[in-house]
Amino acid sequence: MNRIALIEDHERVANIVCRAFANTGIEVEVYDRIATARVALRQLSYSTIIVDRGLPDGDGLEFVRELRSRGTMTPCLLLTARDAVNDRIAGLDGGADDYLTKPFSTQELVARVRALLRRPAALHAADPEYRGLKIVAAATTMEFGDDAITLAPAELQIMLTLVRRDAPLAQEALRHRVQGRDRQLARARLRAAGRACAIAFPHPFC
């Protein structure tokens, strides 16, 4: 059975989420503080983490950044009332894999979590490599020879997908993998990843 961690301090919202997943075969464990979730995540393994931004002991986005800095690549979905485009971009660039605003549809939340569960694990026994271009997922870096750059979370997902492919991948399919239905953000992330690769490694495959 898949198990997800929900970090949410509002009991009503937590109960709604738990009921939404009750008949899906996905177990939900609730934490109302970052501190308790931090301890649990050091001892337990979860398939996905749902994090509220406004928690009593801190910002959920800062906790996601903390997880990513430690090399934890478990998919994270931010659940928040902050619905501005800049907030969504900050959340995704800060390490979240998805972003859902309150009030939300429970059916959509379940669908988004299922989509995250279908993604291949970001970490493998060996870091993927293609013609000398190596992606180190735990360090969120891309290396070529003695050169290396740090990738934003969305850029990391793009490069992992591309390097692990053994066949061409259509742009539309890549956009969907990276950012679901938010095509505007997906295009921005694709352009950013392309620019980062071109600037750091002008001729990596020559």
Image: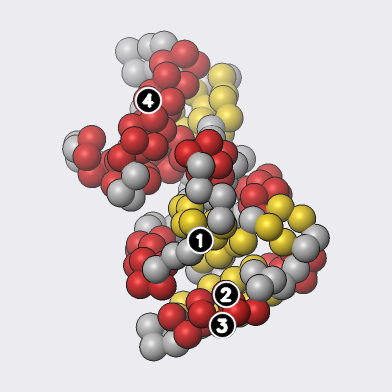
Mark 2 and mark 3 in contact (Cβ < 8 Å)?
A: yes
Give the residue type at disc 2. Val
Which element type, helix, strand or loop, lies under badge 4? helix
Mark with earlier residue (2, 4): 2
User: How many other residues sit within 10 Å of disc 1, few (<14), some (14-19) or many (≥20)?
Assistant: few
Give the residue type at disc 4. Arg
For the question of whether residue 110 can be seen, the reply is no
Give the residue type at disc 1. Lys
Mark with earlier residue (4, 3): 3
Quarter placement of the C terminus: top left
Distance (Cα) linking label 2 and label 4: 36 Å
Report the residue at 64% width, 50% height from top: 61
Query: 116 above or below 157?
Result: below
Report the residue at 43% width, 80% height from top: 20
Mark 2 and mark 1 in contact (Cβ < 8 Å)?
A: yes
Which element type, helix, strand or loop, lies under badge 2? helix
In the picture of the structure, the residue carrying the numbered disc 1 is: 102
Distance (Cα) linking label 1 and label 4: 29 Å
Give the residue type at disc 3. Asn
Report the residue at 43% width, 25% height from top: 192
Quarter placement of the N terminus: bottom left
Distance (Cα) linking label 1 and label 2: 10 Å
Which element type, helix, strand or loop, lies under badge 3? helix
**Residue 137 at x, y = what percent?**
53, 44
Mark 4 and mark 1 in contact (Cβ < 8 Å)?
A: no
Report the residue at 68% width, 57% height from top: 54
Tell whether 54 sits left or right of 166.
right
Distance (Cα) linking label 1 and label 3: 15 Å
In the picture of the structure, the residue carrying the numbered disc 3 is: 15
In the picture of the structure, the residue carrying the numbered disc 4 is: 191
Please tell me which residue lies in front, 157 or 93: 93
